[in-house]
Image (tube, rainbow, N blue to C red):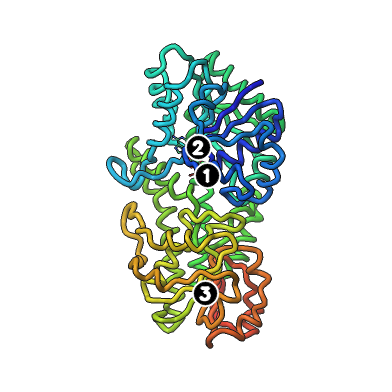
């Protein structure tokens, strides 16, 4: 029986391994993590992450051929294939701080693999890493464990949070990069055999190591760039009377462009886009390509600008001050169908409003009060130039209450900011909400989810990203 071990039971490691276990009943899959609470949660009824369809997959295989454990060394030593899916955040200090990937978790995982391995292994980069990381990993493994043959593969993950299970069941492609040697080819084939249980072979792309590593950074940079492009257009739409939804529709009809990822919003978030572009920027700078670095930097700058623009719009619309005013924040997660708040634009928007002394009443169906308060009390890391948002003073956290539904959040509020596109925000009884708000009642829709005309008919003053302004 082939044995797989995955180091890192997070948003990627957990769902990816659960799907491998489901699709390959003859493979034993162990997901290991140093976090005891995370592993306990994976072994409980309350999984550590919210992802539609995940619970069902885990229930079908847990205890049969899918195991979650903190016994990292045992499972790594027994495995034929070791995936490494640890976090690779942006470095916060030292060389490359604010841009380069922090590979300390990766390095310690690699050293541990070398220490405990007694048989040959395929080591798979599942985390997103800088191009050329495999070279460093090879050095760490081979210098620390001379008798073992390690083959390093790059197999970046392209799932999106909120649709992870769907994406894993039916991926656009699976990418496997390896050494162009007979041993490398054998390792690629072994991993290909795993995915071939459910992924059509024509969707499994095999490349050299560096192409696979760089493709993941490139894909995230292209996706984020589309969002910044449409968000840059949204600012121009507001200035000219064009409607960004109509512009996106017209532009997306061009088959060379396509309709996806053209929704204007308050900005992208999530743990990956910003981190991976910063990483790309750093790699370009290290390779003597400052113009290319500046090109990609702009994607993040536009994203920061979009958040600032939103906050400024809220404050200026509400007679140039939100001091003491109750503002309902609907949605805190970085997108719908996830409870993940990493780099969510809601953090910067809330901090901007708190900086102007607003009282915030926050509701998100999947994010806890603890998480929201933790996020809002953290200092924002200044990656290049300061983001032009006033950062919240930590004591301003007393200006925040987290409530259990949208009606409570909006009761007595002067304004509403919609920051996540949860489906339930489309279906709210806005007539009832209007009745219970201060007047004039404002709605600032950062995700274009409300029916602007309908809300204006009710009596709201509505601002929706990239839409013609209320007269
Ligand atoms: P995460 O923080 O949710 O999970 C990482 C896990 O690794 C944590 O539980 C941590 O405790 C564990 N870990 C760290 N060092 C360890 C060690 N030495 N031994 C055992 N466990 C260890 O991160 P994530 O969102 O799953 O992302 C993982 C990687 O995948 C990152 O490189 C990320 O960029 C990439 N990625 C993420 C997504 C996404 O949507 N989240 C999508 C594609 C790729």
Q: Quadrant of residue 205?
A: top right
Q: Horizontally, is 297 left or right of 149 in the view?
A: left
Q: Which residue is mark 1?
A: 38
- 141 or 218: nearer the eye? 141
- Label 3 vs label 2, nearer the camera: 2
Q: Is mark 2 within 8 Å of ligand 1?
A: yes
The secondary element bearing badge 1 is classed as: helix
At label 2, counting other C-alpha atoms closer than 10 Å, the crowd grade (few under 14, some 14-19, many 20 or more) is many
Real-space Cα separation, disc 1 to disc 3, in angstroms: 32 Å
Q: Is mark 1 within 8 Å of ligand 1?
A: yes
The image quadrant of residue 203 is: top right
Q: Secondary structure beneath disc 3?
A: strand
Q: Position of residue 70 (x, y in %)?
A: 51, 35
At 58% from the left edge and 57% from the top edge, which residue is drawn?
Answer: 262
CB-based contact (under 8 Å), mark 1 and mark 3: no
Image quarter where the N terminus lies is top right
Tag on residue 33? Answer: 2
User: From mark 1 to mark 2, how far is it between C-alphas?
Assistant: 8 Å
Which residue is pictured at 57% across the width and 20% down the height? 187
Answer with the quarter of the image where residue 135 lies.
Answer: top left
Write the residue at 62% across / 21% down.
189
Whether residue 200 is visible, yes or no, is: no
Q: Nearer the viewer, residue 176 or 77?
A: 77
Residue 167, position as x, y percentages in the image: 65, 43
Q: Work out which quarter of the rendered image holds the C terminus and state it.
A: bottom right
């Amino acid at each position: 029986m082939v044995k797989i071990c995955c180091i890192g039971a997070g948003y990627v490691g957990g769902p990816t391994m659960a799907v491998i276990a489901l699709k390959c009943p003859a493979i034993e899959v162990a997901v290991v993590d140093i976090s005891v609470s995370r592993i306990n949660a994976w072994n409980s009824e309350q999984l550590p992450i919210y992802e539609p369809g995940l619970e069902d997959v885990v229930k079908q295989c847990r205890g049969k051929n899918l195991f979650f454990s903190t016994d990292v060394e045992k499972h790594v030593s027994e495995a034929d294939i070791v995936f490494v899916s640890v976090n690779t955040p942006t470095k916060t200090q030292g060389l490359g701080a604010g841009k380069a990937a922090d590979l300390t978790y990766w390095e310690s995982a690699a050293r541990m693999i070398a220490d405990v391995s007694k048989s040959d292994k395929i080591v798979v980069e599942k985390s997103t890493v800088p191009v050329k990381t495999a070279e460093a990993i090879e050095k760490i493994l081979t210098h620390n464990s001379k008798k073992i043959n390690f083959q390093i593969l790059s197999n970046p993950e392209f799932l999106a949070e909120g649709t992870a299970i769907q994406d894993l069941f039916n991926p656009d492609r699976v990418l496997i990069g390896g050494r162009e040697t007979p041993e490398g080819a054998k390792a690629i084939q072994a991993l290909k055999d795993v995915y071939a249980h459910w992924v059509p072979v024509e969707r499994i792309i095999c490349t050299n190591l560096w192409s696979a590593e760089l493709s993941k950074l490139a894909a995230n940079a292209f996706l984020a760039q589309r969002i910044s492009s449409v968000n840059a257009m949204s600012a121009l739409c507001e200035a000219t009377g064009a409607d960004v939804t109509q512009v996106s529709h017209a532009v997306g009809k061009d088959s060379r462009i396509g309709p996806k990822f053209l929704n204007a919003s308050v900005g992208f978030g999530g743990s990956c886009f910003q981190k991976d572009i910063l990483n790309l920027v750093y790699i370009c700078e290290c390779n003597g390509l400052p113009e290319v670095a500046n090109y990609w930097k702009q994607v993040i700058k536009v994203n920061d600008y979009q958040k600032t623009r939103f906050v400024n719009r809220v404050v200026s619309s509400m007679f140039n001050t939100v001091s003491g005013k109750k503002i309902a924040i609907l949605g805190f997660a970085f997108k719908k169908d996830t409870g993940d708040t990493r780099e969510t634009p809601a953090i910067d928007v809330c901090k901007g409003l708190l900086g102007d002394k607003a009282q915030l009443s926050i509701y998100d169906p999947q994010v806890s009060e603890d998480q929201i308060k933790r996020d809002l009390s953290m200092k924002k890391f200044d990656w290049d130039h300061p983001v032009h948002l006033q950062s919240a003073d930590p004591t301003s956290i007393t200006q925040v209450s987290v409530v259990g539904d949208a009606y409570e959040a909006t009761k007595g509020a002067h304004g509403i900011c919609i920051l996540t596109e949860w489906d339930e925000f489309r279906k709210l009884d806005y007539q009832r909400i209007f009745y219970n708000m201060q007047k004039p009642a404002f709605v600032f829709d950062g995700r274009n989810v409300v029916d602007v005309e309908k809300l204006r008919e009710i009596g709201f003053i509505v601002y929706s990203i990239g839409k013609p302004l209320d007269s």
